[in-house]
């Protein structure tokens, strides 16, 4: 869980820019299981600065735009590579979402080139 300043409960700071925190909150909210505390902290973070809303919404829009590329063979190949060799490691939902965010960003790059 993070506080409004982007630090988790152990005091570790997340990315200093709004984009880094937006990515963190996007992963948390997309995990399918945010806690009540996470939802409350997310709501506080969004309300703290209009730039937070813009950064989060930009990620959400990018996620939607690139969803059409999820079945692209090149995207699937990158996904397999990212997950290869990790079968003996327990991968949490948020780690998987981090990989998905990277895939989304690659999709944005790919779509801008087309």
Image (spheres, rainbow, N blue to C red):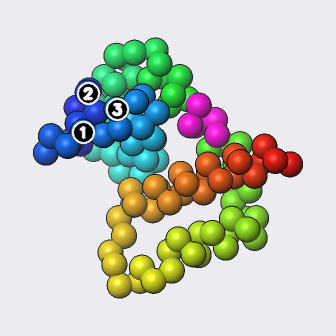
Task: Please name the residue that numbered disc 3 is placed on.
Answer: 16
| Side of 113 relative to 53 (left or right) | right
Q: In what element is the residue under mark 2?
A: loop
Query: What secondary structure prevails in the magenta region?
Result: helix
Q: Nearer the viewer, residue 114 or 66?
A: 114
Decide: marks 1, 3 in contact (CB < 8 A)?
yes
**Residue 88 position within the rendered picture, expressed as x and y whole percent measured from the top left:** 35, 84
Residue at x-position 60% and y-position 57%? 103
Assign the N terminus to one quadrant of the image.
top left
Of marks 2 and 1, the one in the foreground: 1
Decide: marks 2, 1 in contact (CB < 8 A)?
yes
Residue at x-position 36% and y-position 51%? 33
Task: Please name the residue that numbered disc 1 is placed on.
Answer: 13
**Residue 102 position within the rendered picture, expressed as x and y whole percent measured from the top left:** 55, 54
Question: Is residue 59 positioned above or below 46 on the image?
Answer: below
Q: Is residue 61 magenta?
A: yes
**Residue 113 position within the rendered picture, expressed as x and y whole percent measured from the top left:** 81, 47
């Amino acid at each position: 869980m993070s506080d409004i300043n982007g630090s988790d409960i152990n005091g570790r700071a997340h990315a200093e820019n709004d984009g880094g925190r937006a990515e963190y909150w996007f992963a948390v909210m997309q995990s399918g299981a945010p806690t009540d505390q996470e939802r409350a902290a997310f709501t506080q973070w969004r309300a703290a600065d209009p730039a937070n809303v813009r950064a989060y919404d930009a990620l959400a829009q990018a996620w939607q735009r690139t969803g059409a590329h999820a079945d692209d063979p090149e995207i699937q190949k990158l996904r397999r590579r990212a997950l290869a060799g990790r079968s003996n490691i327990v991968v949490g939902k948020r780690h998987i979402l981090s990989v998905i965010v990277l895939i989304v960003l690659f999709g944005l790059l790919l779509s801008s080139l087309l």
